[in-house]
Amino acid sequence: MGKRKKSSRKPAPARQKVPLDTAFTCLFCHHDKSVTVRLDRKEGVAQLVCRVCDQRYQSKVNHLTEPIDIYSEWIDAADAAQKDEQGMRRSTATSSRAVAAAASVDSDEE
């Protein structure tokens, strides 16, 4: 014996997709919605440009890539560049101190 269908049950409303942002805040000049992302899927390239400070970033894309993905890659690349720059400064300062310390030890021995 089968179950009876309820005639009072209405179909659920379709969920509306909220569109993702395509304009973002710049990391360097901090202006809201000044960074735009353009995706060229045929060429496989995405370009990110700030209209205020003219910062640019370019990345490869595929059919699943969205503008927020390119913005996130830009943030990661900027963080990595900043860490590399700080690492270079530290290693240079450390090596010059080590050289200066070694030179002072050699002069003290003489």
Image (spheres, rainbow, N blue to C red):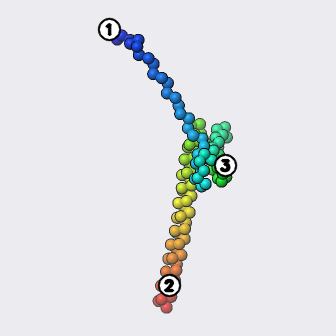
Task: Please say if the residues under marks 1 and 3 sit with CB atoms less than 8 Å apart.
Answer: no
Q: Characterize the local packing of mark 1: few (<14), some (14-19) or many (20 or more) Cα atoms within 10 angstroms.
A: few
Q: Position of residue 36 (x, y in %)?
A: 63, 44
Query: Along the polypeptide, which appears first: circle 1 or circle 3?
Result: 1
Could you tell me how far apart the alpha carbons at marks 1 and 2 are, in whole angstroms? 98 Å
At numbered mark 1, what does the secondary structure look like: helix, strand or loop?
A: loop
* Residue positioned 66% across, 40% down in the render: 40
> Is residue 62 in sight in this rendering?
yes
Can you name the residue that lies furthest to the top here? 1
Could you tell me how far apart the alpha carbons at marks 2 and 3 are, in whole angstroms? 53 Å
Q: Between residues 42 and 81, which one lies in front from this camera angle? A: 81
Q: Between residues 87 and 54, which one lies in front from this camera angle? A: 54
At numbered mark 2, what does the secondary structure look like: helix, strand or loop?
A: helix
| Disc nearest the viewer among 1 and 2 | 1
* Residue positioned 64% across, 49% down in the render: 50
Q: Position of residue 17 (x, y in %)?
A: 53, 31
| Disc nearest the viewer among 2 and 3 | 3
Amino acid carrying label 2: it is: Ser
Q: Characterize the local packing of mark 3: few (<14), some (14-19) or many (20 or more) Cα atoms within 10 angstroms.
A: some
Residue 104 numbered tag? 2
Q: Position of residue 109 (x, y in %)?
A: 47, 89
Q: Characterize the local packing of mark 2: few (<14), some (14-19) or many (20 or more) Cα atoms within 10 angstroms.
A: few
